[in-house]
Amino acid sequence: MKSNARFLNRQLFNTTFGAVSVLVFLTACTVGPDYQMPPPSPSQHYDQQAEQRLGQRIDLGKKVNGDWWTAFRSPKLDNVVRRAIDGNLELVAADATIRQAASSVAAAQGALYPQVDFSAQAGRVRTHNSRAPVVSNFYAIGPRVGFDLDVFGGNKRQVEQQEALTDFQTHRYEAAYLTLTGNVASQALLMASANAQMQAVEKLLANDTKNLELVRMAHLNGSTTQIDVSLAETRLAQDRTLLPPLAQQRDSARHALSILTGKGPADWIAPDFDLSEFALANIPVSLPSEMAHTRPDVLQAEAQLHMASAAVGVATANLYPHVELSAFLAQSATGNGGAALWGFAAGVAGPIFNGGTLKAERQAAVDGYNASLADYQQTVITSFGQVADTLQAINHDAEENLAQEDALRAADSSFRLNQQAYAQGENSILQVLEAERAYEQALLGQIRVKTAQYLDTVQLFVALGGNSVGVFEQRVASREAPKRSYQ
């Protein structure tokens, strides 16, 4: 009898184990869509008209070589940008977020391996299976092992989803890096522009003051009227109003640079920038088909698309059974007796009826994927538009710069002619001062146009993605390197 029972138990175990093995091998697959990168854009141009008009000033199809801001050839700017990269607190926060996402990947990967737990129990128990109740001590101690076979790949898809989240956070860091470097360059240019304009305004005010003194002297001599004096006073007062806004622009730019480097305005003072420190050569402009690999926001949208694809796989796997193997080994005792216990089990649990919840969740995941795909496509199109807008802005800056140069040459010529005429006694000093004032006004206009050219160039580098892709890996590689020293 005992031998027959053992045979039947063994046959039942072998049948169960065989059935589970067949189920595992027949269904061991990862369900749901395998993520595929969206195809590159077929576009080869951003705005053909703008590209043709720019001509030799851009290198279409060429990528940025090295740090993009070095194209301005300003060692002082390079120094401040690197200080900001090392000290900016938004980058520090983005760095921590990436490491947090990486830990979530490691946590999700843990579900792919056997789970080993340890348990222990102890207490007193009273039994009534004899004439007199028996009170005795008991304990049980031992490990338990459980393993989800993940035959439909739900856990693998969750790992894939977390890895895509890590990619998203990495590209978010790159986007913050790109924004930071663009802001530093812009603020440095605004400070330089304010300094140059303030110098021009101070010369203008000096001329206004001379003009007023001469008009007052002429009025005392009876050669001019009080109206002329009043006009000269008004002009001086009006031109004085130009200085405070420029001083505010300079100070705000200096404070912004301090904040961007992770310091308070009183803790670190940015150096003064001069507009003459900056210069530009041809601008490399990558092709639209390469945009998906150079802009962090496009890569962020792609990572979100990958996450949505993995979410479809997770929701699909939930429609199928879960197969789990478990085993335990325990040493237990009650009263004065003890024994070693062990067990092995295979379990299958699958949905039968849940009111359509799981199917609805999968459909929601599919719809979420379609929404992410549309968002990705819109991000790519928007990025093309931003580059096209900036290329046109640089074109219009060039047109305005040519017109402003003509105005400056004309004002300079008028000023020189008036000086010669005054030396020959053919006109008055007031005419000379008026011509000099017109020259200073034209000089102010040229400074503003040059500033706009530089700022639009910064925006073009940012719109193209700069060279921000991969900077986090560089940060990790240099994390243990000695810190930079700044001048």
Image: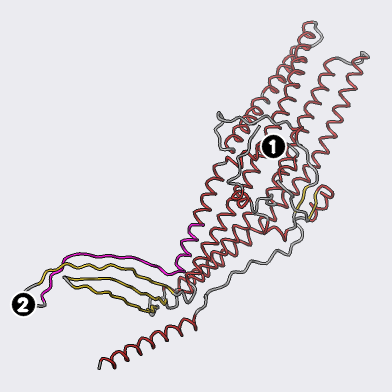
Residue sitting nearer the eye, 232 or 251: 251
Lateral position of residue 318 relative to residue 55, left or right:
left
Which of the two discs, 2 and 1, sits closer to the camera? 2
Q: For the view shown, which residue lies furthest in the top direction?
A: 221
- Which mark, residue 29? none
Seen in the picture, residue 104 relative to 340 is either above or below; the reply is above
Determine the residue positioned at 42% across, 73% down: 148
Count neighbours of disc 1 (C-alpha within 10 A) and say few if under 14, some if 14 to 19, many if 20 or more.
many
Could you tell me which secondary element the residue under label 1 belongs to? Answer: helix
Q: Which residues are the magenta region?
A: 102-128
Residue 301 location, x and y as percent? 59, 59
Question: Separation of disc 2 and disc 1 at Cα?
Answer: 95 Å
Q: For the view shown, which residue lies furthest in the left direction?
A: 131
Residue 328 location, x and y as percent? 33, 73
Seen in the picture, residue 212 relative to 17 is either above or below; the reply is above
Determine the residue positioned at 38% across, 78% down: 349
Residue 253 location, x and y as percent? 63, 33
Residue 467 location, x and y as percent? 68, 50
Lateral position of residue 324 relative to residue 122, left or right:
right
Q: Amino acid at mark 2?
A: Arg
Which color scheme is applied?
A: secondary structure
Count neighbours of disc 2 (C-alpha within 10 A) and say few if under 14, some if 14 to 19, many if 20 or more.
few
Of callouts 2 and 1, the N-terminal one: 1
Seen in the picture, residue 19 relative to 110 is either above or below; the reply is below
Q: Amino acid at mark 1?
A: Leu
- Which mark, residue 131? 2
Residue sitting nearer the eye, 166 or 9: 9
The quarter of the image holding the N terminus is bottom left
Residue on which the image places disc 1:
77
> What is the quadrant of residue 250 in the picture?
top right
Determine the residue positioned at 74% across, 50% down: 64
